[in-house]
Image (cartoon, rainbow, N blue to C red):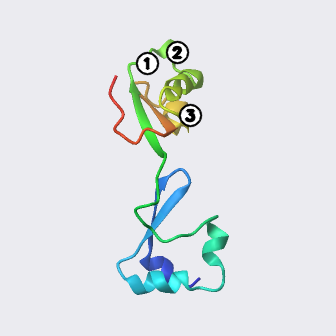
Amino acid sequence: MSKAYFGRVNIKRISSNMVVACCKKEEIIHKIEGLEDGTLSNLFSKVERWSEKIQVDNKMVWLACQGIPLHVWNCMMFQNIAKKYGEFLGVDIDTRCFKSVVRGNVHVLTKRLTKLMKY
């Protein structure tokens, strides 16, 4: 695929296994869809035009956890917190390396599509 197309298309993740490609010019999307070199099928397992029928059933979120006592500041604690909301994906480097113990950031895959509550 020509680099010219990539410069005009904005790709954003909308769930753990879905991205949406946005472009200001409809003609560029048509050109990309019509490419015969299989570029999109090499990058993605399924390519389809957006419609209201497409359902997003999960999202990746970062939980900012505050008030965690230092003696339980470990990966197991953050995994337990993540389980309340979905699947534990990991913690950020600052949390893992104790750069700050005021807030721990936990990456979670959740099916909750509404705003997560503060506790």
Q: What whole-number distance in Å separates the C-alpha atoms at marks 3 and 1?
A: 17 Å
In the picture shown, does residue 16 fall above or below 119? below
Check disc 3 and report its element: helix, strand or loop.
strand
Q: Of the two numbered discs 3 and 1 on the same chain, state the one appearing first in sequence.
A: 1
Q: Residue 110, how many percent across, how many down?
A: 49, 39
Which residue in the structure is indicated by mark 2? 72
From the viewer's side, name the closer residue of 6 and 102. 6
Check disc 1 and report its element: helix, strand or loop.
loop
Kindly report which numbered mark, 3 or 1, lies closer to the viewer in this rendering: 3
Residue type highlighted by circle 1: Ile
Q: In this image, 87 relative to 11: left or right?
A: right
From the viewer's side, name the closer residue of 21 and 57. 57
Does the residue at mark 1 contact the one at mark 2 (Cβ under 8 Å)?
yes
The numbered disc on residue 94 is none
Residue type highlighted by circle 2: Val
The numbered disc on residue 88 is 3
Residue displayed at 33% across by 29% down: 117
Residue type highlighted by circle 3: Phe
Which quadrant of the figure contains the N terminus? Answer: bottom right
Which residue in the structure is indicated by mark 1? 68
Which quadrant of the figure contains the C terminus? Answer: top left
Q: Residue 10, how many percent across, how many down?
A: 43, 70
Q: Residue 54, how many percent across, how many down?
A: 47, 59
Q: Residue 116, how many percent across, how many down?
A: 36, 34
Residue displayed at 47% across by 57% down: 13
Q: What whole-number distance in Å separates the C-alpha atoms at marks 2 and 3?
A: 17 Å
Q: Of the two numbered discs 2 and 3 on the same chain, state the one appearing first in sequence.
A: 2
What crowding class fits label 2: few (fewer than 14 Cα within 10 Å), some (14-19), or many (20 or more)?
Answer: few
Q: Is residue 86 visible?
A: yes
